[in-house]
Amino acid sequence: MRLVLQLVARLLLIVVLCLGAATVWATFDAYRSIDRATAASAQRVAQALQALYWRELLLRSSRAREHLLPVPDWRTLETMKLISPGVCVEFQPAVAFEKPLCGQSEGLGKAPPRWFAAIVPTFLGSHAEVIRPVSPRAAAAGTVVATPDGAAAVSLAWEYILNVIDVALLMAAAIALLASLAIAHALAPARTIVTALQRMARGQYRTKLPRFRSMELAMIGTAVGELGNRLEEATEQRAALTRRLIEIRDDERRALARELHDEFGQNLSAILAFANTIETASTKDRSTGIAQDARMISQATHHLMASLRDALKRLRNPLPEELGLEASLVNLVDSWRSQSAARPTIQLDLRGDLTDISGPAATTAYRVAQECLTNALRHGVAREISLRVERRAGEDDALLIRVEDDGGGDAARVAQSAGFGLTGIRERVTAAGGSLSILPARGGLSVAATIPLAA
């Protein structure tokens, strides 16, 4: 999952938890608000009756105090206004058949569902009545008893919850949206960093990143830039070292070719001459056994000389340095075609302008084609081999060499092979700043090398 989605999901989880906590608190506060309304109603009615009591006491001074009760004058519309909705108030000692005076409880809110009406009283408990004396100085003045209505309390709590949830849901949606936009904006540079790392993985190490406002992202961008510079330097050093090693190896190959030509070539020529002399002398002396041995020596010498010539061709300087890349590739294919009629068909496909390709790029391309053809002809059972050399002009000026055959083979095993031939061309291609791939083809293998030509 993307980091933005993870952060948004966690934010939504936090919002849901906060919304749940707010709902619980709103339920408790709304349910208990009826207790506060009950106490306030009892206090207001008691104060009103206290004023009524002392007024009656002054107006009816001839009566006994225990008979100075503010009844029934307290049951008025003014007293009704002092009672909160959902609360009933009665005066004690009450007159016979007197009913409590209740506040208007209709319209407090929507009727709550049954599960809510059953759960809330179970967990939050019931409401207690509130008793207030009419006059603290005259106990005979009576008391005011305020009793809350449980159904009204549940309805009030449900209405309060609905109002809170509506506001909370709107706030949660707004917070989630704004926070998502803020998170996406804050993490937008991460996409740039990932793109830079992907370019580095493809070999474009010197990737310049923009300056980020966030200190942490700026530190990451700086670290990525430094890493790219170090990778570029290390790659350049490795390529230079590989080129130097290839030069040293080529010098050694040329020196070895001279030694083989001067020493082994001359000695094999001398052995062949001695064998011919022995064969001629034995024929004159009619020594058939010696003559036969001399012919076998001559045949073995001819075979060694052919192998030596083949080795010298591979050890000496490649033809691109003398004939150019295009002519050397044509000569390479013709030499393989002329060796045996039973060999597979070799198709050469040259595309683009190859005339101005010289130096290490031409040498590398020739060596890749030479080694791939050698492997396909010697180690496979191919019936058809295709050699394609294409120059891709434009900004990405590069040379593509592709050799395909239908001789079977396991591409994964060949790619992991540590043979000298593949290792050599892989080193040459890497030193030239290119890439080499070995993939399965239709009926066989496909070896492709890309060699950049841009300076």
Image (cartoon, rainbow, N blue to C red):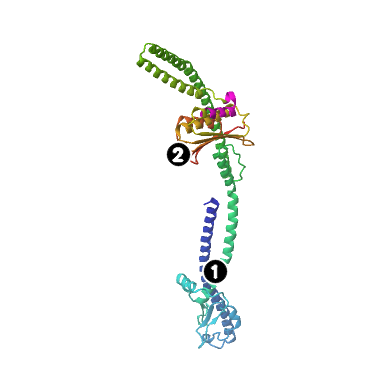
Residue to which mark 1 is pinned:
161
Q: Is residue 182 visible?
A: yes
Type of the residue with mark 1: Ile
Question: In percent of the image, x 53 and y 70: which residue is there?
Answer: 30
- Of the image marks 1 and 2, the number of the one nearer the N terminus: 1
- Tell me the quarter of the picture where residue 108 sits: bottom right
Question: In percent of the image, x 55 and y 55: which residue is there?
Answer: 8
- The Cα atoms of the two marked residues, 1 and 2, are separated by 70 Å
Where residue 224 sits in the image (x, y, percent)? 56, 40
Q: Nearer the viewer, residue 86 or 110?
A: 110
Mark 2 falls on what kind of element?
Answer: loop
Q: Nearer the viewer, residue 125 or 289?
A: 289
In the rendered image of this protein, does residue 152 appear above or below residue 283?
Answer: below
Q: Which mark is residue 410?
A: 2
**Quick check: is 346 in the magenta stretch?**
no
Number of marks in the rendered image:
2
Range covered by the magenta-colored residues: 320-336
